Image (spheres, rainbow, N blue to C red):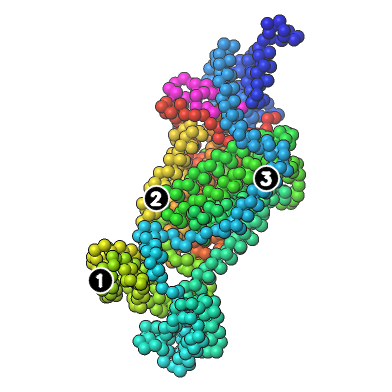
Amino acid sequence: MLRTCSPRGRRPRELDADARRSQPGRDAGDDRLDDLPARLDAHGPPARLLHQRPQAQGPARVPASWSSVALPGGSPDQPGARRASDRSAQPLARALPASVGRGLDRKRPQREGLLWPPFTRGGATPRIRVETQRRLSNTRRTRSVATLGRWSARRPKRAIAAWLAFVVIAVGAVVATGIQSLQNGAVGESARGYRLLDANGLWPPPDEIAYFHSNTLQVGDAPFRAAIKDVVQRLSDEQVELRSPLDPGGRQFVARGGHSAVVVAALTGADARTVRDLILAAAGAHPGITIQETGDITASDAHDKAVNNDLQRAEILSVPVTLLVLLFAFGAVVAAIVPVVLALTAVAAAFGLLGPISQSIPIDDSVRTVVLLIGMAVGVDYALFYVMRSREERRRGRPPHEALERTVKTSGRTVIVSGTTVIIAMAAMFLIHTKVFNSLAVATIAVVACAVAGSVTVLPGLLALLGTKIDRGRIPLLPHLHTDQTHSRFWTTVIGAVLRRPVVSCVAATGLLVALAIPALGLKVSAPSDNTLSPQSIPALRALDEVRRDFPGAAENAKIVATVPPPRADELRKQGRRLEQLAINSGLGHRPVIETANGDGTAAALFLPLTGAGNNKASRHAILALRQDLIPKTIGSIPGAQTAVTGLVAEDVDFTHALKHGLPYVLVFVLFLAFVLLLVAFRSIVVPLKAIVLNLLSVSAAYGVLVLVFQHHWAESLLGFTSNGSIISWLPLFLFVVLFGLSMDYHVFILSRVREGVDSGMSSDDAVRYGITATAGVVTSAALVMFAVFSIFGSLSSLDVKEAGVGLAAAVLIDATIIRAVLLPASMKLLGDWNWYLPRALQGLPRTEAEAPPARDPV
């Protein structure tokens, strides 16, 4: 019946193709599949088309499916066998460089006799149907993202208004609720000790300290004593409890040598600011004596001010620096502004969401800076992929709306996969079960989720609204990275040299990374106080450091808290005094020891200044000795007693223990995730294993850089910090999960293009060269943005944020140069077809297409 009704004598096959074209969800590639049998009848055997030498005017077009044919001489499980079963679906019209076409003609003539049988009339249709079904399944997988993007592109004003409304609502939420700060990140026994102190009201009043020092005068000299008397008199009318060298037995408030002294004011009701002003007012009346003020509240306020100043400085510097990098990337002002706008709104929305979230999961102070750091990096990164792909599609001659739709279907999926990978990697921090890592995880997940949401919703609408105006503001004389092109002379030269000498390149690059990683074997972690992490140039913190240097009794203390049944109250007091004496005699602590108790004497606490600097081995040893030896002999021997040792040093000990306990689970979680992701994406067990090894080398080298910079003193003047001989305890694990999430993004991005080349029939060398050079502009631009943003945080004053910035910047630099430009291509050259080895048992893995930048234009 179809033949009878066919217009102008068209064959039934053509009518079948017309019917199939009318099916929903089809694209141009499906039509070309349907027309392939007819075109084969007209043009003859495809082997002649494949091996026809390319003409001088342009590259040869090679159907990808023609290269997906099993070769003799090997089983389907062997890497030397090229088979259709392990090839991802590719467009039929593949544009290849002319040199690659000549390489195929010269190197693989044996395929000519193998290509014809599968494409006879009887054999072509099943292959085409399978190929078509595979493409339709890929279309369904991206339908949700594409639908959302199309809605945004067709209604850009509504999309932009909806995104801005979301940001405003989020900011309103944080204004209404505020951000609940994490008071301490204690875990284990330390956390239990704080709960006992709070429940029984055992906290002593905070202390403010007046510090006196003279290089020439001593405390016994009249001017020195006059200065002390003046401060005591000024504070006598305030609600404070004073202790000074003028008291009977006040010798403990005079430093060894007699050139320094302190007056301690316990705030029983007075305001810390009033006490601070009165002490500093006395400084001008005694020119021969240096009078400084510090204390619990003053030092805490100084730390908070330093954190806020750091955040403001990062906000001020990150935007212009990012804009400058993007100007070099795009060469146009408008195109450079779009990623920055997305990143800033995503960061604002994330800060807003942290308000209600922090009511359940309190947020550590350092997390606020980390949110800005990660948000600017990934927000710009995702927008860069969108803007680059949109410009590339328009450069290839597509109308703006069609170019944008292609961008949404391709780069939108890339952003979803990348963001999900980073979020899952960040979620691994929940496995540590500590408040600090919980706050880091929830904050970074929030900002990455906001960046992804903005990329797939508002960004298509913004690009649709701008249209070709996105290329406005070009700066003619400004050199840029040509992100809208798929070739790079620099990277072509580098990759060519690496592929010519892969063994030398592998050995040299691996040797350099191992040399950088060796110092990481001496990595030491600690959780020092906030005051230690803040810059010591702040007067209050500098004064506190000098007080602790001159007075061992002002060192970090161990808070020993105990509760007993009511009949045992007298025994608790007796054993408490015995514990204090044993600790002093054994050298674990110093006087003065502060004692507190509740009303009925069933709960008491000792605040014992510890030996050591508070963050060194001696202080940690003192905590262990108290817990394991002295307390069991004294208070712990009371029937029904509950004891705990807490404080900053005890927190450090417990946090490090929790970190070591949870670290294996995090490593297994992240490495397994990376392996599965790349296994499914590339249908190879070699690619994920190699990616894991390369990423571990990159992270280890970054750890080595951290140790070289921050555990030694040579870089103190260069970066403006004072080394405490260790790395902040949360940083190594945080760096690991962040770097794995970000590096997997680029790894998939690059290897997708390499796999495209292999599936198109390129040799392994040509595919590696093509994949890396084609992605060079985009990946280099994204890496430069991240390096610039991370470097800004490396210049801030807070030591923990400085360490994070330097570590991330070093890792990004290593990953973008040594890993991507040397080790990756060299290792792929050495492995050859083994790169794509997949055992027979894994042939049933689901197929997916990892997104890569657009291929070169057909000519």
Magenta segment: 67-91
Residue 48 is left or right of residue 302, and the answer is: right
Residue annotated with mark 2 = 663
**Residue 329: % across, % down:** 66, 48
Vertical side of 135 occupied by 168: above or below: below
Asked whether 83 falls inside the magenta stretch, the response is yes
Alpha carbon distance from label 1 to label 2: 42 Å
**Of circles 1 and 2, which is in front?**
1
Which residue is depicted at the point 76% across and 47% down?
472
Residue toward you, 18 or 239: 239
How many residues crowd around disc 1 within 10 Å: few (fewer than 14), some, or many (20 or more)?
A: some
**Residue 635: % across, % down:** 26, 67
Numbered label attached to residue 571: 1
Q: Which quadrant of the rendered structure holds the N terminus?
A: top right
Vertical side of 793 occupied by 753: above or below: above
How many residues crowd around disc 3 within 10 Å: few (fewer than 14), some, or many (20 or more)?
A: some
Numbered label attached to residue 162: 3
Tag 2–tag 3 contact (CB < 8 Å): no
